[in-house]
Amino acid sequence: MVTKSSDPFFKDYNVDRHLLMDQMLEVSKVCIGFCRECDALDDAFLCALLEHYNIIEFTKGEASYAAYRVGAEVNSALVAMGLHQEIKADHKVPFFLAELRKRLRSMIYGTEISIATFLGRPPRLSHRYMNLDPPLDLTDSQLFSEDPQELAVAIARLDDQGYNRDGEIRLMSWVRSSIGFVARREEILELSIGNYTPDEVRQKAVDIQRKTEEHWATLPHYLSSLKESLFGLDTDDIFHLHLRNILRQISQSNLLLLHRLLVRKAGAGPADLIRTARAILSDVMRAYKRFEMSAETSFIYFLAVHGVRSAVILAIELLKQEQLPVYPDVPLLPRSRTIQDLSIFADKLSDLDPLFGDKSICEKGQKVISLILDKILSPPRASERHYHQSSPMQTRRADTDTNTATDIFQHTTQSAQSTQVTESYALMGDFDYDIGAAISGPDHEFRQWLENMDNQDWGL
């Protein structure tokens, strides 16, 4: 959890947060440099390197080369220490240290897959060459207890899958459960940047979703229930809500990535992609209704990272829907609700902390959403009215895809919905600049698409 620059702490103690961050980064560099000069390679160095990595990511952005370079060293140190292999307690490695190493490995692997997905690059760590046995669901006080009996009792109270039986979502509950979802994301990334035929993409997508469901089945009820529960209103504890938040979004984000991939590489229709994007944005908006969240930068980061892509997808799809020659009786996107949600979301992006490294990307996303909403809510230009009146497509009925098979990976080649999508792209006018990158392209293409928005003539 990270506080915002507007936190009273900085005013009460006369602390300039930007200066404080610069000092932290400088001190971190000195510590890491000292370790390098001493040729240190141990647990303390790996922990310090990971914290240094986190600071650079936050201040310079996940897309920066500085962060990518330090990430490479973190991965290299992990492998050089042999932590990609089995980690077990023995006469040389006490139990608490073995568990700490498992925690570190899980977090480093998760970070690497997240960054690789965001940048569209091959991962530098892979579950195929690592032992990813996750840490046990123990609290720090239990793990570091000086009473061996207390630790033994805590371990004995865990269930067969290594989770606590108290129904508490702890930090290690999230770390332990997230590994299965992160491994699936790596497979989605491989499918995205690899060379596969449409049939192979569809089959592997089915396999990935099957493995995901199998992983959900291994989780205790207090974790597996997050998959279907009404999110954001079920706990008063902010930290617990944050853990619920990120666990649910790991699976949701994987599904969004998979649907985008199927649209791009297997010719699937956009209905399932839209439904998943709506679910993610709904979670984001519901979570942000909790007033106390606005005090935490971690939640603002969640708003940006998990909301921007879904919001842009929905904005573009709503514009396409608005420009159909015949408006569907049952549209995929409810017009009024979608416009309201997008308007509120775009406004909330203004709350991003000035020190947030990826703020510029989010600001461009905000601009795209606002421009699209302006176009939707503005009267049509004369040329557009003439096009609609003269278009032979008026005689066609838009297919809303409400009768699509429930199998989210079912392939339909020349469906009526594909015709609808093609026609609606033809009607995009000033908004058709490489629109595929925003809808179905990988994250790095989406980021580049947003970065190029300032160079485009939107014609508004």
Image (cartoon, rainbow, N blue to C red):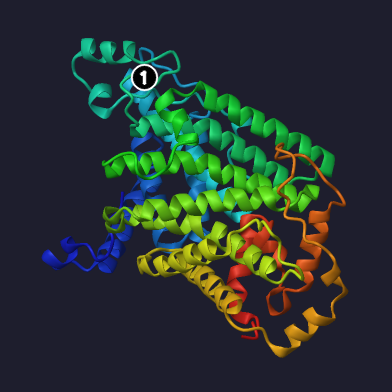
- Between 27 and 325, the one lying in front of the other is 325
Residue placed furthest toward the front: 329
Determine crowd level at label 1: few under 14, some 14-19, many 20+ residues with C-alpha closer than 10 A: few
Q: Which residue is mark 1?
A: 93
Q: Secondary structure at mark 1?
A: loop
**Quarter of the image holding residue 309?**
bottom right
Expressed as whole percent of the image width and height from the top left, the position of residue 325 reads: 77, 71
Expressed as whole percent of the image width and height from the top left, the position of residue 339 reads: 52, 67
In the displayed structure, 387 sits above or below 121; it is below
| Residue type (three-letter) at the residue carrying disc 1 | Val
The residue lying at 47 percent from left, 40 percent from top is 248
Residue placed furthest toward the left: 12
For residue 57, say whether it is visible. no
- Between 92 and 233, the one lying in front of the other is 233
**Quarter of the image holding residue 6?**
bottom left
- Between 133 and 362, the one lying in front of the other is 362
For residue 395, say whether it is visible. yes
The residue lying at 58 percent from left, 82 percent from top is 378
Q: Is residue 164 left or right of residue 87?
A: left
The residue lying at 46 percent from left, 26 percent from top is 134
Expressed as whole percent of the image width and height from the top left, the position of residue 193 reads: 72, 48
Q: Is residue 347 left or right of residue 413?
A: left
- Between 423 and 48, the one lying in front of the other is 423
Q: Is residue 202 left or right of residue 35?
A: right
In the displayed structure, 5 sits above or below 458; it is above
Quarter of the C terminus within the rendering:
bottom right
**Quarter of the image holding residue 95?**
top left
In the displayed structure, 247 sits above or below 275; it is above
Q: Is residue 226 left or right of residue 274?
A: left
